[in-house]
Every structure is written in structure tokens, then in C-alpha cells.
Amino acid sequence: MLDISSEELTGANDQLRAEAARQGEALRSLQASLGRLAMPSASAAGADVTDDLLGLTHALEQLVQQRESARELTEQILDQLPIPVFLKDRQGRFVRCNRQFEQFVQRPRAQIEGFTIDDIVPRTWAGLTHEEDERAWRSGRMVTSERRLAQRDPPMDVVVNRVVIRSGGEPYLLGFSIDVSEQRAARDAMQHAVESAQAASRAKSEFLANMSHEIRTPMNGILGMTELVLESQLDPQQRDDLALVKGSADALLTIIDDILDFSKIEAGKLEIEDVPFDLRALVQDTVRSLSLPARRKGLALECELPPQLPPMMKGDPGRLRQVLINLLGNAIKFTSEGAVTLGVAMRPTVAQRCEVEFTVRDTGIGIAPDKQKLIFDAFSQVDGSTTRQYGGTGLGLTICRRLVILMQGDIAVSSEPGSGSVFRFSVPLGRVAGAVPEARGALPAPVTDAVASAPPVPAPPAHKAGRLHILLAEDNPVNQRLALRLLEKMGHRVTLADNGVDALEHALHGAVDLVLMDVQMPGLDGLAATRILRQWEATAAAGGHVPVVAMTARAMQGDRERCLEAGMDDYLSKPIDSARLREVVARFHGRVAGAVLDWRGALLRLDGDRELLLELAALFIGDGPQLLAALDQALAAGEREASQRAVHSLQGVLVNFGAQRAIACTERLAASLHEGAPGALAPGLTHALAHELAAELQDVMAALGEQLGGA
């Protein structure tokens, strides 16, 4: 950097001003003498002329001396500057330079002034200098260029500044250089550090993904086979022992999930969705999923919902459920008697969004005041001693806080030791266009474990005539046995393939109804096999669509998206839960049968609430054409992001009705939009899929209309 103090510049300026004043006085004296010589008076004597001549000579000598003194002063000032400075004429000849410039080009001043750059430096350097000089001459403004002098030892990085000035009516090019080697080295070091950190982050993410895969694969067998044994005839002691095994395995997976989620959040790879969902159903399902551990501890698990809860909201249901499960799970863990209550409250609406506040209250051990500020920090626990009673990674609340912040909300805790804790968090959720508050009346009292323990609608039995032919592509023997047992128990016929090549062959020619495809397989992985299958189906001679559901132990951000982009229809992460497997297979069972809706499955997800399902159907019939029109407009305008949002919105609503054919269209369209090149959308497949989706939506709305007509 240029290191010249303001005092030095002021002093040099004062010297130049004083020297200019002295030269001005000498010039005025010289002009007076010349004037008397040019117009002598008639009475002037010869002696007077002689005196004028002597005065003129003396004035000229003073002027020369002063000019020489000014030149020396200028040279001294330039030589004291800590940077190289040069002055060129229009022909490129060096007129002046300072001592730093001599050192810079490693030549004495006598070999610089009067010469051009071609006489001083190598040809490559000279050529670049000519180009930079010419830019300055043409622009008339300060021109800055960077140069790395690799021939120096060590190499030098310089910034050269050039500007055109004028003196005595002649133009000159003034230039000066600044050594920025240290700054460049610091910048390069910083860039290297950033790249190293990014590489380390990628390596960590890949390690965690591989670790997750390696742990989940055997855990899939442990959990699945334990669940199967629990469904058999056991004495109470055996059942309790196996329940303990399953609980321990679930706890281990929770730890793995916490670590993976924390890694994704820290790496900034976790995205928040904004899709329609049923908030009431989400809350009820979440409470129900935690009812068993609450009942085992003798706790009352209560859920308080407001009477005027909108039937559909927009937000990220998956992340919202994750926060609720974490907070409720903590409350149950730290409460030995009493109750755990989840409350939901609606705040005033702003535009099309409203604040929804969730409150989790417990009657547990409470949190000391000095610990309440620490519990949201990573790896922080209220009791970190070796004698602590409660386990955990110390990441659960950290993840909750980060997720709430990502959803543009806030979270806080209030607690008193021995009297329980209250965790509150609020997030802004959008209102779905056309949705109206439900009018089923207020709940007369908190739903004390009623939501959690309501018996589910039984799944329809798989009849032999309607059973599916399922291709199971899995190379792990334990997972093979588990999946075979589960699927056969559901009444389906299963063909096994233990590598990708065989799986593709069966999918192409085996007349299968559904493929459960492991992603990592020898020979040909599941993603590649699915891409080939979809390419084959796209040919005119083939046609049709074989549903493919990914099964993978990888659970990192983007894995589901990669599966859908490859042409898969759904995604199951290992260890595979039997209920989740049954749900997925049931959805595709309805799709294979040609059903437009899975009305029974939709009722099952809403706890048999037919009135609510009919209300959702009426809303979709009213909003569906608008959602489709928004998609058509975005596609016609070539707006990729708007098209993706429109597809996402449609998919989020269709899930409520189990409209699998239409959902499959949205997923294929979403994958097509994601795979396209940046910029304007290309026609062809994307618009063909949009046309197919429009036809499917007409069938969905017609089927929903029939349900409403028969209500």
C-alpha cells in the first residue's frame, strides 16, 4: 500500500509553493528590465543602458538558479516517495523517473530517461505496457492494471496506475506502481483456506452419509426383524425384552439423525419448503406417534387445538413436525409424572401469512435459570456430569432453534426447577388461497391422549386377486429377508433381484407392478437402472410406466431429489418402517388398479374425518384450475422457479387425496424442470408432461365431484 503521511505531502507542497513564488518574483524583475531596454527614454544615457543590461544578466542568472533549484527539489521529493514513479511523453519516451523506479526496472536513470520501454524490459512485458499506456491515452482517465512479475525472485505482484497530465501545452503520461505482493499472498491464502474448508465440509458430509448408510443397513435388519418377532406369539417377558431392543435401536437412529441434521444445517445445505399441508392433521399425527412412550410412563399427553384452525396452511410440514417431535420427546423424557401438553394458537394475519405459536408444557424436572441460555447451544446439556440421569447428544434443541430460525420464526423457554418447563416457538405460515376456517366448533376440552390413542382405520386386506407383483431389488441378505417377510405378509407376490442388471431385466420384461429399488447395488446402481427404464418407456414401442420406489440407507440432503430426478416415484429411507412400507405399497396398489383417488387412504390419514376430507375436496375443486393456470403461465413465460413452485403447490394438495397418477405427473414434471439447462425452459418433454398433468387433474376433480355428490 502507498505509505506517505499527510505531513510529508504538506511539507513538500509548501516547498514547491515557496519556490514558485521566488521564480515568479525573478520573472517579474526580468520583464521590467526587458521593458526598459525595449523602450529607452530619449534622455537616457549610455550608463543607464549598461546598468539595465547588467540587471538583465543578473535576473537571468537568478532565474536559471531558481529553476535548477526547483528541479533539484522536485527530484528529491520524487526520490523520497516509497513507490516507483515515471513520466512519459506521447512517443513513449521516459521523461522523468524516481529512484524507486530505477530499482524497479533495475537500471540507472541514464539508461531510462530518453528511452522507451522496449529498450528496458523483455518483449512480453513491453507489449503489455504499450497496451496499458494506450488505454490511458485514449480514456483520459486514471487507468489501473495488475501485473505479476514472475521473472522476479520472489515473484512480485504490482498495481500500475496511469493518468494523462499536461504541462506547457504538452501531454504527458504520469504513472506509479504499488507492490501488492503481501495483499495478494494474503488473499490467495484466504482463498486456499476457504477452498480447504469447503473440501473438508464436503468430505465430512460424505463421511456422514457413508456412516449413515453403514449404520442404517444393519439397523434396518435389527428393527425390521424385531418388529416382525413382536407381532408373533411371545410371553410378556420376551415382549418386554424385545421392546427394549427396539427402543435402543430407535434411540441410536435418533442420535444418527441428530448428527446428520446438524451437519446439514452447519453446511448450509438444508432448505425450507413452502407447500400446502393440513396443520390439524400434522399436529394430531405427531402427538399420536409419541403416545406409546407417554403411556408407558403413565403420563397424560394432551393436545389443545383452537376452534378456528384453517384447514390448509403453507409452510414446511416436515421440519415443523421435526421440531414438534423433538420438543415433545424431550418433555416426555424429562417428565416422570403428570402431563405433557401441546398447544397451538393463531396470531393476527399479515397479508396472506399468520403467526402460529406452538407451546409444549410439561410437569418435569425443569431447568435452572443459569442453564436456560445454554440449552440451545450445540452439544450443551443441563447435566453434563458422568452421573447424569438423562442421555442425549445435546443437539436436539440446537437443531430445533436452527430449524425455527430457517422458517423465519423464534423459540424461547421458561422454566422453574422442579415445576416443569414451557417451550414456545412461533413460525409464519401462509394461508392457502380460497381456504376458509373450519366450522366444526371448538373442542370442549383438551384432547387428553384421545388424539394420540384413537384407533386407526384398518387397512384393507390384500386380496389374492388384487395383489401386486413386486420386484425387490436388494443385495443385502438381511434386508432381503426382512422385505420379503413384510411384503408377503401383506399378501403380495415378490421377485428378488440382488444386483442392478437383474433388476433392470425384470423391470423391463417381468411384468411387475411395482419396483422397490435399492440405490446402491453391484453391477448397476438403482439410479442408473431407473434412468434406463425410463428411457425405454419413453420410446414409442414401449409406453407405460412402472412405479419405482427408492430404498436407501443414505439420508443426506438432496438424496430424495436425486432419486426423483432419476425417474423414481417415491423414496423410502432405511431402516424401513413396516407402516410406511405398507402405506407406500397401498398407494401404488390403487394406482395399478387405475384408481384416480385413494379415498380410503385419505380418510385414514385424517383419522376417518370424512367431513374434513370433503371440505378439502371442495376447496381443491375451486382452486385447482387457478393452480393449473399459474403453472401454464409460468411455463409459457419460461420462468423456471415459478414453474417449480406451481408444481410443488399442486403436488402438496394432491397428496391429501392419494391421487397417485396425478402426483406421479407432478414428480416427473418437477424432475424435468430441475434437469433443464439454466435460462428459458425448453419445450418438448416439459410441456408434454404439463399437458398430461392437466388431463390427470381433470380426472381428479371429476372424482372429487362424485364424492361430494354422494356425500
Image (cartoon, helix red, strand yellow):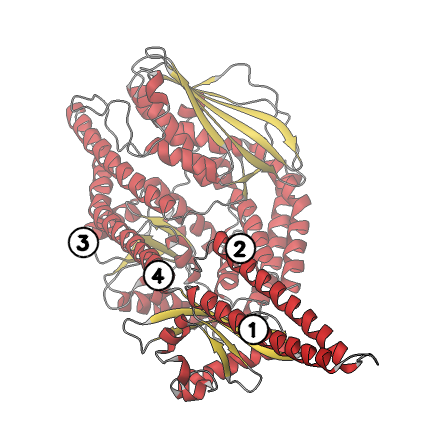
C-alpha gap between disc 4 and disc 1: 40 Å
Q: Which circle, 1 or 2, is nearer the viewer?
A: 1
Query: Which amino acid type is shown beneath numbered disc 3?
Result: Pro
Residue type, mark 2 in image? Thr
Q: Which residue is mark 4?
A: 182
Query: Can the viewer see residue 449?
Result: no
Q: Is residue 67 above or below residue 392?
A: below
**Which tag, 3 or 2, sits closer to the chain's start?**
2
Left or right of 704 in this view: 227: left
* Residue with the mark numbered 1: 67
Q: Residue at x 40, y 58 (%)?
A: 562
Dot label at residue 10: 2
Counting residues from the start of the chain, the first of labels 4 and 2 encountered is 2
- Spatial separation of the CA atoms under disc 4 and disc 2: 28 Å
Q: Secondary structure at mark 1?
A: helix
Which quadrant of the view contains residue 486?
top left
Q: CA distance from mark 3 to mark 2?
A: 86 Å
| Helix, strand or loop for disc 2 | helix
Q: Position of residue 204 (x, y in %)?
A: 27, 51
Label 4, label 3: how many angstroms apart (C-alpha)? 60 Å
Residue 477: mark in rendering: 3
Task: Verify CB contact (< 8 Å) between mark 4 and mark 3.
Answer: no
Residue 112 placement: quadrant = bottom left
Q: Is residue 386 visible?
A: yes
Which dot, 3 or 1, sits closer to the camera? 1
Residue type at mark 4 is Glu
